[in-house]
Image (cartoon, rainbow, N blue to C red):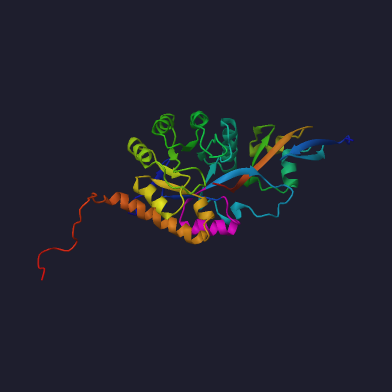
Amino acid sequence: MIKKNKIKIKVNGKNYLVNNNFSLNELINKLDIPKKMVAIELNKKIVDKKKLKKIILKQKDCLEIVHFIGGG
Amino acid sequence: MSKDKLIIANKGYKSRLIVGTGKYKNFLECSKSVNLSGAEIITVAVRRVNISDKSKPILMDYIDPKKITYLPNTAGCFTSDEALRTLRLAREIGGWKLVKLEVLGDKKNLFPDMIETLKSTEILVKEGFKVMVYCNDDPLMAKRLENVGASAIMPLASPIGSGLGILNKVNLKIIRQQTKLPLIVDAGLGDAKDAAEAMQLGSDGVLVNTAIAKAKKPYLMAEAMKYAVISGRKSYLSGRIKKSIYGSASSPKKGII
């Protein structure tokens, strides 16, 4: 059952329910993600990290949040 | 010798050894090995942030990107699209343009798919990236990469992680002679001898990951690689003697008693 004031989004392959009118900035803060160390893709488009506050999440939005790990 | 620097995309580096940061037991072992190797450039991968467990340490806690150059790599990408997506994200994380492109075509041997690699290089260069390109030890392909604007040519010595060492010295020499771009031998080096040999062929540098990370004593091997690269470079610059099938005594004949 979908609550009226909630929307369903996907972050790194996992489903999340967030409030309507939730900004991407609020989500990143809520998830406690250090902005300087990540890149964010919203529906396969790279997000300008300076504009996070302006982006309001929509139903079925798909986010990928990536960072650097050890690799060859 | 202090002036003999590795220059990539107009930036100078004292160390000619680039190390990968994969396959280590933990970040501490990785960062200590990087330190001991003296490397100023490390390769890193781009992966999803672990959102459910943020207490886990991250690479940047151990290796400061202000002190060591992070070289984002597209390891694990099998198509041009995947590689482009990865590197565009990498640029967004750090804001730097120096990247390592690696588009694989074969899951068993991890050989590069040179058609996809060439295509990706061209696009990335147009987007302003400085692209160091992992490639086959094929002089013609290396030339093509150079023609589309690669910043460094990185031919394999042998398959990634194989430890087989340099399989085709002749091709690497030909690539060395035909290009003024930095030539970094990447993949397959197994020990210090292999690294020194790559440098003696005239390479500008080598990239090593598995040989250090999977050695029984990674710290010792990190140091061994550091000295091998310095040694191989100096040996290359020194102009070695000609080989002869006859002996030539080292002591003078004059004054023999």
Do we see residue A20 in this rendering? no
Q: Is residue B179 above or below residue B248?
A: above
- B23 or B97, which lies in front? B23
Q: Quarter-wise, where is residue B257 in the image?
A: bottom left
Judge left or right: residue B237 versus residue B189: left
Residue at the image point whose x is 72% and y is 44% from the top: A28
**Residue B15 at what x, y percent from top left?**
42, 52
**B34 in the magenta segment:** yes
Looking at the image, the residue that sits furthest to the front is B245
Q: Quarter-wise, where is residue B182 in the image?
A: top left
Residues in magenta, as a range: B22-42
Q: Tell how many labels.
A: 0
Q: Is residue B13 above or below residue B170?
A: below
**B32 in the magenta segment:** yes
**Residue A37 at what x, y percent from top left?**
62, 46
Judge left or right: residue B96 versus residue B201: right
Residue at the image point whose x is 37% and y is 54% from the top: B230
